[in-house]
Amino acid sequence: MSIPEGRKIRAVIVDDEDLARQVLREFISAHPEIEIVAECANGFEAVKAASELKPDLVFLDIQMPKLDGFEVLELIGPGPAVIFVTAYDTFAIRAFEVHAVDYLLKPIGAARFEAALERAKERLSGKLPSAPLPAMDLAAAARPPQQYLDRIPVREGASVSIIPVAKLDYAEAQDDYVALACQGKKHLKQQTISSLEAALDPSRFLRIHRSYIVNLERVARIEPYGKDSFVAVLNTGAQLPVSRAGHQRLRAFLDR
Amino acid sequence: MHPILIQLRRLVYYLLGWIPLAGMLAYLLAEPGGLTWVEALSVAFPLCLLYAFVCLAAWYPCLATPLERSSVPRFLITHVAGAAVASALWLFAARTLGRTLAGFPRFAGLDVRLYQDLPLLFGTGVLLYLLAVGFHYVLLAVEASRQAEARLMQASLLARDAELRALKAQVNPHFLFNSLNSISALTASDPAKAREMCVLLGDFLRRTLGLGEKPAIPLEEEMSLIHAFLAVEKIRYGDRLHMEETIDREALSAEVPPLLLQPLVENAVVHGIANLVGGGWIRLSAGRHDGLLDLTIENQFDPEAPPRRRSGVGLANVRQRLEARYGNRASFSASATGDRFRVAVTLPTETLPVQDSARLEVKEKDS
């Protein structure tokens, strides 16, 4: 993505502390080519602002109410250039895995800020290869390492829902999306089913079919279906196809 | 020093243990030995009293030939030789005693009759000595296990000390980074407030530095540390942070380990207030009853907040410190109900060292 000549860079500042936003505002004010289009104090506001205003650049805090910075990035997708701003240096590696432009540590120095801004401009003008991840894999990259998901944030338009994995009945692959079935509703999320499978605890969730992951607690019984195949009947009443390999895995689990 | 000779009580028990042995010896001398009962008893008791002390000497060869590190030949040679020497000594004593007693009219001819019993005495002496060797090995084993236990205890005390030192007085560096960032923001918009925040931060840091060295401080001092901490956080979080305190007057003078409550309050801010868009409250209460100090910290939190790193480390730390210091005399519980998180700590109240010395002075005046 590159910005047309003469148009200002549209920036959003996301931080729950007013004073932290103030520092960024002050630094940005020295750059007339940048326009602050929104300031957000939590993750939900950030997702809303990003999907409605389509900013070019996001200054993103990591630890915030509602959604953390990585969840925000996962939901807004790889469009805008993101500069993380945080007091924690422990997230740096993950930040670059999700292709953040830069990672600023609080307290922020002016020189360091200028350098980050320069990188962002290069990225926006297309000089710096952005190699953005497809949105589907961003979720996997944003996941904390060596740790299974315990909640899945989902964006529907500008609003966000959080699905605790304990409430997830099953997930179904639909092209580039997964449909997450939870309490009778289906939530669509742009992600591959394989990356979701990798993020879920394998002792609680099982891939029973090329297109299905099931919450093992919901499985009521397995019934034969046709000659060589089976269906899993959930205690919600839903019936999911089970592949032959999936059936073996399921049996192995249930026999344990 | 021989372990039995260290305490008079042990020596008495040891000698009492020899009475049945002396009885047995008297029986041997009287029945198969052909002495009269009076003669047998008069010979057996003094001989056994003497031999009891001779057998104590077995301690030294036992010490020099530890069971687990000595070869069998060496073990046998040492103790058989020991037994022979001890028994020979005993025979010599028996002959001397027999001759001495024979001088009395009542024991006339005892030396001759006793002379026939010398092989019997020698055999008994060897057996008794070997019995003493066995006894000393048991003694050594008991001693060794007691020492091992003491060493273990000492090691665990040292480890606990080291752990306590490590646990004490850690200011979360991220608190510092975030505060410095706030100050940086204020330098442009409100220099006076920036200066105020510098002073507050300095005040808090100075207090924590001084406290790390002390074993305990009055709750009042811990509270003023918490106030210094909250004064800084208040500038960062503004209206989002509400603190309510209910603290009994008598609780203020109770002694607490330094920096015990501050991490709990910091936890309440970081995991509670920081995740609430509209902010929330923290309630701290302290009461004293029956020699115990009850402390509770309650805060609002967002049960659906994104999981934070390091969560629970602060709590585990406080729990460990309490355990290391008070064992089961202190209790710690943390629980979440709905949107409230509650930590309750109960610890024994300690008397102030100052009061102790004051009491001493009074006593000295009285006397």
Image (tube, coloured by chain):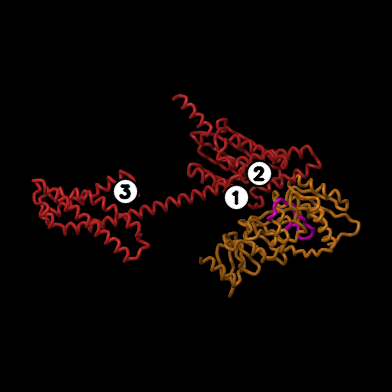
* Residue pointed to by mark 2: B269
Residue drawn at the location 76% of the way across and 38% of the way down: B195
Q: Secondary structure at mark 2?
A: helix
| Span of residues in magenta | A73-90
* Residue A14 visible: yes
Query: Residue A205, percent across and down?
Result: 60, 62
Please check whether the numbered discs 2 and 1 fall on a single chain.
yes
Chain B colour is red
Query: Which sits in the foreground, A148 or A95?
Result: A95
Whole-Å distance between the Cαs marked 2 and 3? 63 Å
- Indicate the amino acid at tag 1: Val
* Residue pointed to by mark 3: B4
In this rendering, would A213 be left or right of A39?
A: left
Chain (orange): A
* Residue pointed to by mark 1: B313
- Indicate the amino acid at tag 3: Ile
- Indicate the amino acid at tag 2: Val
Query: Which sits in the foreground, B360 or B100?
Result: B100
Residue drawn at the location 85% of the way across and 48% of the way down: A29
Task: Give the class, few, some or many, for how many residues have Cα within 10 Å of label 1's Cα (few <14, many ≥20).
Answer: few
